[in-house]
Image (cartoon, helix red, strand yellow):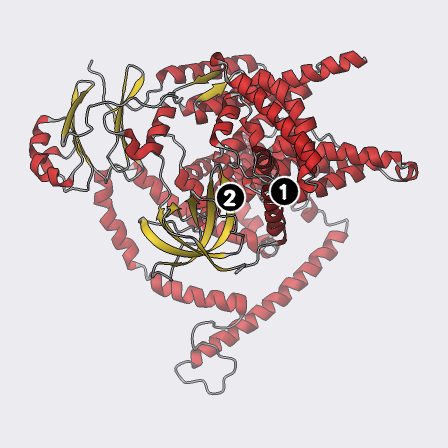
């Protein structure tokens, strides 16, 4: 009975912690997430010290009030001593947790109660809280805290070092300060004495009370905290750890968002002269993209944005990092998503520190005001010199290809070439990723190991394997900075570096634990990477490969010479299938297109790319000799021919309409269960998630009518096709995104619905829609349109008449980047 009651009380904070963790995910504000973090630590503490807490409860007779109070008074001094030994961090966590619990307690009751009851109760609560002198408590509490920490008043004119010259008004404050100083010094001495006494008592084997209750023996610590323990035997500990990770992730994401504090532009800036310092200089096809730190915008010199990104159609080869330049440009705020579940460029720009994006004026000659106004770092200047040397040697596609796969210039190749690689399923090779770093690291690893083995005295005395791993780690670090250290490159570096560290520790580099540790490190540094498709796909691919090859053994007995050749190509083909299957749900959900022919294309292209193109490109980057350039050019032309050949297959490339988020969630859950867990109902649960994914495909509905942010472009779905009622070129970016959502590759055909009519009336799905694009026509036609039409789309901000409030869609409805109209079918 006692154990059942005790377990019941131990589980109360567990359920409370789960509730707070869920609330933290829904409300990512890091100040209040401290409560969830504190409760999760409390849950873990209860789980780890469960047996000791039960023993303490029995000794103190907690469930017998009279005995409990007797024991409490007898051990009062010890209890005070234990509390004094608690760290300041725990006090801060408990304070935040208490404040958060009280705050969420009222939020919870506000959520439970109906709005009518809450409106009645609210004045009484305000009156009750209004009676409490909050300012008085805050003022004196703050002063007492300053005395408690610093030992002196820190307010203006309140530093009272001595009693000389102190006015009669401030005399009491001085004696309060002096008293607190004396009390604090005595308290410190008492704390030191008690600490010495406790250490002496702990050495005494006769006194086992502290050892049994506060401290655990070593074997019990190992038994309690072992990560191999069964979930059924210690559910409280695992629940607490899960709550801790969820709360910490939410806390870190909120902190990252608040600490960045990127101030994005609220309004566009048209054709103004910009003077700024070049932070990044990128070549994008036949254009140039500059990231600037503005110094002056027109006559505006104060509160300037920290970073803007401008695109110029003319490539200026004289621009260098750190130069102060003068440009004439138009800058716009980063665009919001243009459709439901579309790419949110504003969120991406916020985490990159970009306040606005725009383009330079063609007719204005860009000037360099100050050469090297701000000197770039060593690695930036080194990278810039390598890039310039490449383009000075030759401005062909070969130099652009080397710059793409080694220097991180993602858009250096022309758009046509990138489209060919995308259709052939080889686009993942055109950006620095984990594949590039792993290939280069292990090529360098085996090359260094081979050279060291040739030196027999060294190979006998030293551990050649570990020296090669250290050399590869140094090489990887240099390559990271050479390739601009973008987020995908950092992710790949952390994963590969942990694999090399595993070799140094005599562990297997291909382990799910290393993968999990790298994910924790990456998300701890930049938690926004969780929403990046590249992060999701790389970890899904790596996890699937490690999980499958650890679980199943393929080609184990193929040891002959010809068998090894067949084994290599068979493993390459199997790896392509596993990687394709693991990344397929993410590709379908994020990009709405799949290249099936990419499995065969990767089988041919990856060995050639790994053993020919990557080594040759590295040699050409370091030694740009004519012989290496010719050989690399021929190799790249052959590689491009492979991509062109596979991209021409009509059956190899498929486009899909947008899928539901539940499709992706079911795919992730099913894959994790298949690779990690083994239990009785494994197949049943996998079948359930497969069924959930299939049902989500057929039940997901796309928006019937879409409107862009300026309310100038309107499109609707008809017979599984997207029809544009207005000119789609007025917002080509939104139009292309809409076509991708509906799974269309072809350009939209010109329709004659509303191209020159002002206003225009169209009937969609039995509903009459009026489009008014001129502000002058609003006053003339708004009343008649309200009477006749079901919906009215206006390209302006207007005061909505009361009798048609629910019908009008204006610029206030398209602030989020788009607007959609849902038409329910008639039953």
Front-lying residue, 244 or 109? 244
Front-lying residue, 698 or 816? 816
Can residue 467 be seen by looking at this rendering?
A: yes
* Quadrant that contains the C terminus: top left
* Quadrant that contains the N terminus: top right
Q: Position of residue 515 (x, y in %)?
A: 63, 32
Per the image, the residue denoted by label 2 is 282
Residue reaching furthest to the right: 457
Between discs 2 and 1, the one toward the N terminus = 2
The picture quadrant where one finds residue 198 is: bottom right
Q: Is there a contact, CB below 8 Å, between mark 2 and mark 1?
A: no
Q: Position of residue 731 (x, y in %)?
A: 31, 34
The picture quadrant where one finds residue 809 is: top left
Q: CA distance from mark 2 to mark 1?
A: 17 Å
Front-lying residue, 275 or 468? 275
**Mark 2 Cα within 10 Å, few/some/many (few <14, many 20+)?**
some
Secondary element at tag 2: strand
Residue 283 lies, with reference to residue 605, above or below; the image says below
Q: What's the residue at 71%, 43% (across, down)?
A: 474
443 left or right of 317 in image: right
Q: Position of residue 470 (x, y in %)?
A: 76, 41
Q: Which mark is residue 480?
A: 1
Q: What's the residue at 58%, 29% (across, down)?
A: 429
Q: What's the residue at 45%, 26% (across, down)?
A: 591
Can residue 247 be seen by looking at this rendering?
A: no
**Mark 1 Cα within 10 Å, few/some/many (few <14, many 20+)?**
many
Secondary element at tag 1: helix
Front-lying residue, 355 or 49? 355
């Amino acid at each position: 009975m006692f154990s059942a009651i005790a377990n019941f009380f131990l589980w109360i904070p567990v359920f409370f912690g789960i509730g707070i963790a869920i609330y933290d995910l829904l409300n990512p504000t890091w100040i209040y997430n401290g409560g969830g973090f504190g409760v999760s630590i409390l849950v873990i503490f209860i789980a780890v010290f469960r047996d000791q807490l039960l023993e303490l409860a029995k000794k103190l007779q907690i469930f017998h009030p009279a005995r409990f109070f007797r024991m409490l008074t007898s051990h009062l001094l010890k209890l005070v001593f234990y509390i004094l030994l608690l760290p300041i961090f725990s006090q801060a966590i408990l304070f935040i947790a208490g404040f958060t619990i009280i705050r969420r307690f009222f939020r919870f009751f506000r959520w439970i109660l109906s709005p009518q009851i809450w409106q009645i109760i609210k004045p009484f609560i305000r009156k009750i809280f209004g009676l409490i002198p909050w300012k008085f408590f805050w003022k004196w509490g703050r002063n007492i805290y300053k005395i408690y920490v610093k030992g002196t008043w820190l307010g203006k004119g309140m530093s009272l070092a001595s009693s000389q010259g102190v006015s009669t008004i401030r005399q009491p404050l001085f004696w309060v300060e002096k008293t607190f100083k004396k009390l604090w010094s005595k308290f410190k001495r008492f704390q030191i004495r008690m600490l010495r006494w406790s250490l002496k008592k702990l050495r005494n084997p006769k006194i086992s009370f502290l050892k049994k209750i506060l401290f655990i023996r070593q074997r019990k610590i190992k038994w309690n905290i072992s990560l191999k323990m069964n979930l059924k035997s210690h559910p409280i500990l695992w629940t607490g750890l899960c709550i801790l990770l969820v709360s910490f992730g939410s806390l870190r994401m909120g902190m990252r968002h608040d600490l960045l504090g990127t101030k994005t532009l609220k309004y566009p800036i048209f054709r103004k002269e910009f003077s700024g310092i070049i932070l990044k200089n990128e070549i994008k096809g036949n254009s140039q993209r500059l990231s600037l730190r503005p110094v002056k915008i027109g006559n505006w010199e104060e509160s300037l944005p920290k970073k803007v990104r401008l695109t110029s159609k003319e490539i200026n080869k004289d621009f260098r990092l750190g130069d102060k330049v003068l440009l004439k440009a138009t800058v716009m705020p980063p665009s919001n998503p243009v459709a439901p579940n579309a790419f949110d460029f504003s969120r991406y720009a916020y985490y990159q520190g970009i306040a606005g994006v725009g383009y330079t004026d063609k007719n204005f000659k860009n000037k360099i005001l100050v050469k090297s106004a701000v000197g770039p770092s060593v690695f930036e200047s080194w990278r810039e010199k390598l890039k310039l040397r490449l383009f000075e040697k030759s401005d062909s596609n070969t130099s652009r290809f080397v710059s793409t796969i080694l220097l991180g210039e993602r858009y250096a190749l022309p758009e046509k070439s990138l489209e060919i690689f995308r259709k052939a399923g080889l686009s993942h090779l055109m950006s620095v990723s984990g594949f590039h770093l792993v290939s280069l690291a292990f090529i360098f690893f085996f090359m260094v190991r081979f050279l060291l083995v040739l030196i027999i005295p060294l190979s006998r005395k030293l551990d050649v394997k570990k020296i090669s791993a250290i050399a590869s780690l140094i090489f990887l670090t240099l390559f990271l900075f050479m390739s601009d250290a973008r987020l995908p490159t950092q992710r790949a570096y952390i994963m590969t570096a942990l694999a090399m560290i595993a070799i140094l520790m005599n562990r297997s580099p291909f382990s799910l634990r290393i993968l999990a540790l790298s994910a924790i490190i990456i998300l701890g540094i930049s938690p926004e990477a969780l929403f990046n498709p590249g992060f999701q796909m790389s970890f899904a691919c790596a996890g699937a490969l490690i999980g499958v090859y650890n679980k199943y053994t393929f080609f184990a007995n193929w040891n002959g010479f010809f068998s090894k050749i067949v084994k290599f190509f068979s493993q390459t083909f199997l790896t392509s299938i596993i990687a394709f299957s693991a990344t397929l749900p993410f590709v379908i959900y994020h990009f709405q297109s799949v290249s099936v022919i990419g499995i065969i294309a990767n089988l041919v292209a990856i060995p050639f790319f790994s053993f020919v193109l990557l080594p040759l490109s590295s040699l050409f980057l370091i030694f740009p000799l004519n012989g290496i350039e010719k050989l690399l050019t021929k190799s790249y032309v052959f590689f491009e021919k492979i991509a062109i050949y596979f991209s021409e297959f009509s059956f190899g490339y498929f486009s899909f309409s947008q899928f539901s988020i539940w499709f992706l969630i079911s795919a992730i859950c099913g894959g994790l269960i298949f690779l990690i867990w083994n239990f009785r109902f494994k197949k049943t649960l996998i079948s359930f998630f497969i069924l959930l994914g299939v049902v989500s495909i057929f039940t997901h509905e796309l928006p019937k009518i879409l409107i862009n942010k300026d309310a100038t472009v309107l499109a609707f779905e008809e017979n599984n096709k997207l029809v544009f009622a207005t000119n789609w070129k007025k917002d080509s970016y939104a139009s292309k995104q809409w076509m991708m959502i509906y799974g269309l590759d072809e350009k939209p055909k010109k329709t004659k619905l509303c191209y020159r009519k002002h206003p225009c009336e169209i009937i969609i799905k039995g509903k009459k829609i009026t489009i008014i694009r001129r502000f002058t026509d609003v006053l003339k036609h708004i009343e008649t349109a309200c009477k006749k039409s079901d919906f009215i789309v206006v390209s302006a901000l207007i005061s909505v008449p009361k009798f048609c409030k629910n019908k009008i869609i204006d610029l206030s409805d398209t602030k989020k980047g788009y607007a959609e109209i849902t038409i329910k079918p008639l039953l």
